[in-house]
Image: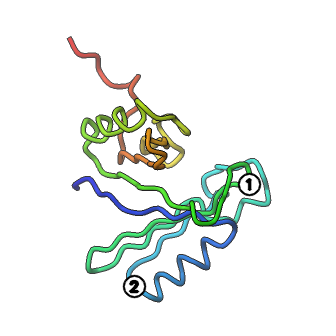
Amino acid sequence: MTTKLNPYLGFRDNAREAMNFYQSVFGGELTLSTFGEFHASEDPAEADKIMHGLLATDNGLTLMGSDTPNTMDHTPGNTFTVSLSGEDDAELRGYWDQLSGSGSVTVPLEVAPWGDSFGMCTDKFGVAWMVNITGAQPMSAQPEQA
């Protein structure tokens, strides 16, 4: 699997409706996961909200989206993130280091409840990024270089 770059849209309480709409427009397979499924929120009101939505079409389009947790700012018009995802640990960690190095880290790059390494940052230009490394091991679990 190669590294993918695609838009990630943020919604406030209507990600399910929006992602179903985009599926009706573009077709493809839609996968939706809730905050409750991953125990990703302590707020019971968020249990059925979408933590991650993925629309993948037969012609190669990929669109992701989620509900923004109540504890995070949601400003319509500023509701997108660029997502980098794939299996190449070294490549993706290199991108992470460069993007987050002169910016700010929102969520540290570490193993997430779904088993991948995941992090969120904002680069020095104010662009929000997500990095997801499929099945990657945490930095502390990797062997040290001699």
| Quarter of the figure that contains the C terminus | top left
Q: Earlier in the sequence, mark 2 or mark 1?
A: 2
Question: Measured from the top left, where is residue 136 in percent x and y?
Answer: 35, 39
Which residue is depicted at the point 48% across and 81% down? 22
Q: Is residue 31 above or below residue 87?
A: below
Q: Do the residues labelled 2 and 1 touch (CB within 8 Å)?
A: no
Instruction: State which quadrant residue 76 falls in.
Output: bottom right
Instruction: State which quadrant residue 45 falls in.
Output: bottom right
Which residue is depicted at the point 23% across and 56% down? 1
The residue identified by callout 1 is: 70
Helix, strand or loop for disc 1: loop
Question: Measured from the top left, where is residue 142 in percent x and y?
Answer: 33, 25
Is the residue marked by circle 1 packed among few (<14), some (14-19), or many (20+) residues within 10 Å?
A: few
Helix, strand or loop for disc 2: helix
Q: Farthest residue toward the bottom? A: 24
Structural distance between the alpha carbons of marks 2 and 1: 29 Å
Which residue is depicted at the point 32% across and 58% down? 5
Q: In this view, does 140 lie above or below 12?
A: above
The residue identified by callout 2 is: 26
Q: With 46 as the anchor, is 35 left or right in this view?
A: left
Q: With 139 as the anchor, is 81 left or right in this view?
A: right
Question: Measured from the top left, where is residue 90 in percent x and y?
Answer: 25, 35
> Which label sits on residue 118?
none
Q: Farthest residue toward the top? A: 146
